[in-house]
Amino acid sequence: MDEKLRELISLGASVSAHCFPCFDYHLKKARKLGLTDEEIHETIQMGLMVMNGAGEKMIEKIKAKLPNISIKENESCARSQRKKELRFIPFIHI
């Protein structure tokens, strides 16, 4: 595996794991290696898809165990504190 591919994998994994220090580190390293914005954006999108898939499965598990629970769409502690520049991040829709 070459260094560029390793950084793309690491960047996507950091997104899906919600690891801010890893994301910053691997984004900086990806740019240093000359990865294009398109490659970086595609990798981030894949990481978000994995993250959202895991979230959807957790919601399914919660609903199976607690069928009477009411889960509000896009509810998040962090959402009310987000800055405008972070509004592009997709959230799980229920």
Image (cartoon, rainbow, N blue to C red):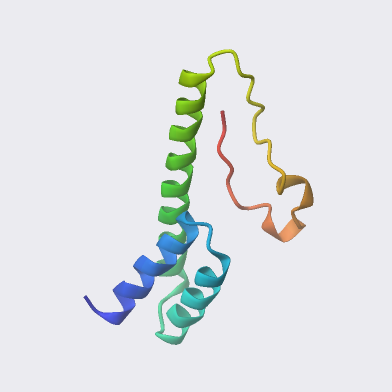
Q: Is residue 79 above or below residue 8?
A: above
User: In the image, is 36 to the left or to the right of 71?
Assistant: left
Q: Quadrant of residue 33?
A: bottom left
Residue at image position (47%, 34%) is: 58
Vertical arrangement, residue 35 with respect to residue 16, above or below:
below
Task: Give the percent coordinates (x, y) of residue 75.
Answer: 68, 36
Using the image as rendered, state which of residue 93 and residue 20 is in the foreground: 20
Location of residue 39 in the rendering, given as x and y in whole percent from the top left corner: 40, 68
Who's the residue at 60% across and 52% down the image? 89
Please tell me whether residue 51 is drawn above or below residue 94 in the rendered image.
below
Furthest residue toward front: 65
User: In the picture, which quadrant includes the N terminus?
Assistant: bottom left
Write down the quadrant of residue 77 in the picture.
top right
Task: Tell me which residue sits at (68%, 57%) in the image.
Answer: 86
Q: Position of residue 35 (x, y in %)?
A: 40, 78
Given residues 61 and 6, the one toward you in this image is: 61
Picture quadrant of residue 29 = bottom left
